[in-house]
Amino acid sequence: MSQEQKTIRVMGTGFVKTTPDTTRLTFEVDSLHDTYEKAYAEAAIGNKNLRETLEKLNIPKDSLKTTNFSITKETEYKHKEDKFVFVGFKLHQNLAIELPLDSIITSKVMSALGKAWPELEVNIAFIKKDSHDVKLQILESAVKDAREKAEIIAATLGHKLGGIISADYSKRSIDINYHEERLAICDGGFGDKNCSIDYTPDDIEAGDTIETVWYLE
């Protein structure tokens, strides 16, 4: 490229709306115990109950994944004593399960798991299980947007848009997720009308950018 060759740098943005097809439930439990053994026992019994409950619902027990688990020694600062004192062993665990986008199935699972381990808190999210095609659509939209902007800029500057020099997209990633909501888990049983979750999730909006550099003729 000669020193006289002019270029422009343009950022293209792509947006796509897509319908979620999967419900993701993430469960969290935090509890404090006076011994390590009691904290571990709660985790062991709770996890056993959860997986047995899923099997009763004809859902494979290995569908429930543990994403985080810890038992830590907790202390608390006492101002009068001017020191940290032991308060107990804290159990912290996160679990997740993905289900079809079906409010009846989701309600049954939440209700059943709530009875199996009442201390659980739950987040619900709606996702696109296979987002490969969506990501390609976003990329295509971003490239078109970049070219349209580049053509307008070139024309405004009194030039024609030349060839493309580079396009930077190598380190970008897109998370195709609907926002999460924290819910109080229901333990009233399948027949409790208050346990039903009737939802119609909105489309997921996802976007990304691509940086392009063009010649000007």
Image: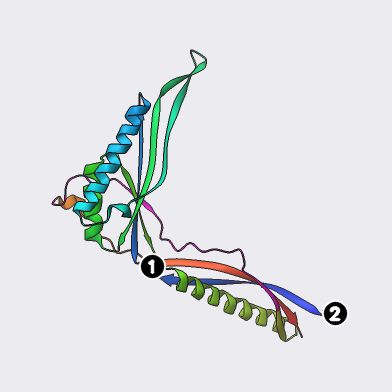
Categorize mark 1 by other alpha carbons within 10 Å: few (<14), some (14-19), many (20+): some
- Using the rendered image of the protein, determine whether residue 197 is visible from the camera's viewpoint: no
Which type of secondary structure does the marked residue at label 1 adopt?
loop
> What's the residue at 41%, 68% (across, down)?
130
Say which residue appears at 38% left-offset and 41% top-offset: 93
> Percent from the top left, x then y, of residue 136?
51, 74
Residues tagged 1 and 2 counted as in contact (Cβ below 8 A) = no
| Count of numbered tags | 2
Within-10-Å neighbours for mark 2: few <14, some 14–19, many 20+: few
Q: Is residue 180 above or below residue 40?
A: below
Query: Residue 17, located in which quarter of the rendered image?
Result: bottom left
Q: Which residue is mark 2?
A: 2
Residue picked out by circle 1: 203
Occupied quadrant, residue 213: bottom right
Instruction: Considering the whole magenta stretch, tell me its main secondary structure.
Output: loop
Magenta stretch containing residue 168, yes or no?
yes
- Residue 44 in the image: x percent, y percent? 31, 38
The answer to whether residue 67 is above or below residue 205 is above
- Side of 30 relative to 104 (left or right): right
Q: Position of residue 9 (x, y in %)?
A: 71, 72
State the residue in front, 185 or 55: 55
Locate the N terminus by quadrant: bottom right
Whichever of callouts 1 and 2 sits on the residue coming sooner in the sequence is 2
Badge 2 amino acid: Ser
Viewer-proximal residue among 52 and 79: 52
Q: Does dot 2 land on a helix, a strand or a loop?
A: loop
Range drawn in magenta: 165-191
Q: Quadrant of the C terminus?
A: bottom right
Say which amino acid is labelled 1.
Answer: Asp
Q: Is residue 126 visible?
A: yes
| Residue 9, placed above or below residue 195 | below
